[in-house]
Image: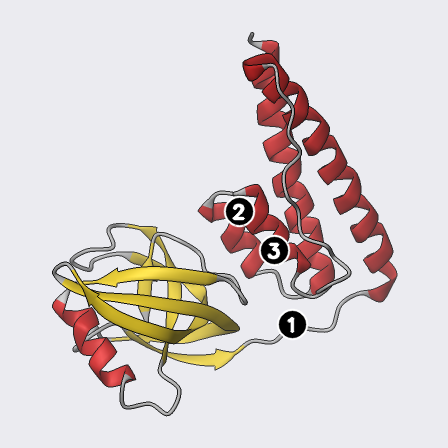
């Protein structure tokens, strides 16, 4: 396991610099796997360096696509895969470890699927409109954000949208930890509503 101050989504690429001895040992262990990988988990409190941190209980499997020498360590190019549910944290010897199980999406309430999708769309429309007004106030220009197309990958759409909007780690974790697609869209809509409220409040202060 690799505790970090970021949340990795399934399908998301991430670049990491590994320099601590315990994580270099982890990479050596991963190199012996047929498909080298490790779990990325969010640190809720504490530091990425030196241990003594408090860790979340949902993680993402990260497949190692490429390694290269880096300054004082190793550079990794990884991609998120399955979600992992942490069953038990084990001693950090010689590196952070846990007992985990793959956590696919659970069955969703199909009756709530369409309302959740509509609500997410409405929240996104509000955010885009407010963000455009905010940009005009600041720079006189309006540029629409580049957003993913839900039709290309409906299951991965909430993750892709959260990435495109640059949501903070706490919101990203709640989205990752949602048990099913319908709940995930509702959690994402809540996060977008919060972001819109911040922009609206900021605009009133000008």
Is residue 176 toward the left or the right of residue 97 in the image? right
Q: Element type at marker 1?
A: loop
Q: Earlier in the sequence, mark 1 or mark 2?
A: 1
Q: Element type at marker 3?
A: helix
Residue pictured at 83% horizontal, 47% vertical: 118
**CB contact under 8 Å: marks 1 and 2:** no
Give percent across and percent down for residue 127. 68, 32
Residue pictured at 51% horizontal, 73% vertical: 81
Residue 106 appears in which quarter of the rendering? bottom right
Q: Nearer the viewer, residue 142 or 153?
A: 142
Dot 1 surroundings within 10 Å: few (below 14), some, or many (20 or more)?
some
Q: Which residue matches tag 1? A: 105
Q: CA distance from mark 1 to mark 2?
A: 18 Å
Dot 3 surroundings within 10 Å: few (below 14), some, or many (20 or more)?
many
Say if residue 174 shows up in the picture. Answer: yes
Q: Nearer the viewer, residue 188 or 152?
A: 152
Q: Which residue matches tag 3? A: 160
Is residue 41 toward the left or the right of residue 26 in the image? right
Q: Nearer the viewer, residue 91 or 205?
A: 205
Q: Which residue matches tag 2? A: 171
Is residue 51 toward the left or the right of residue 187 in the image? left
Quarter occupied by the N terminus? bottom left
Q: Nearer the viewer, mark 3 or mark 2?
A: 3
């Amino acid at each position: 396991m690799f505790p970090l101050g970021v949340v990795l989504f399934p399908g998301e690429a991430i670049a990491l610099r590994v320099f601590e001895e315990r994580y270099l040992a982890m990479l050596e262990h991963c190199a012996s796997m047929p498909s080298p990988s490790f779990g990325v988990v969010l640190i809720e409190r504490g530091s990425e360096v030196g241990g003594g941190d408090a860790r979340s209980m949902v993680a993402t499997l990260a497949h190692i696509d490429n390694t290269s020498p880096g300054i004082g360590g190793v550079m990794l190019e990884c991609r998120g895969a399955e979600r992992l549910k942490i069953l038990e944290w084990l001693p950090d010897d010689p590196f952070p470890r846990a007992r985990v199980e793959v956590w696919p999406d659970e069955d969703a309430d199909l009756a709530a699927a369409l309302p959740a999708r509509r609500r997410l769309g409405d929240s996104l429309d509000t955010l885009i409109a407010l963000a455009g007004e905010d940009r005009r106030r600041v720079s006189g220009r309006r540029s629409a954000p580049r957003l993913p197309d839900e039709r290309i990958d409906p299951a991965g759409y909430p993750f892709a949208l959260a990435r495109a909007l640059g949501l903070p780690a706490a919101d990203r974790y709640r989205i990752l930890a949602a048990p099913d697609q319908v709940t995930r869209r509702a959690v994402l809509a809540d996060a977008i509503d919060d972001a819109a409220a911040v922009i609206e409040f900021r605009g009133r202060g000008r």
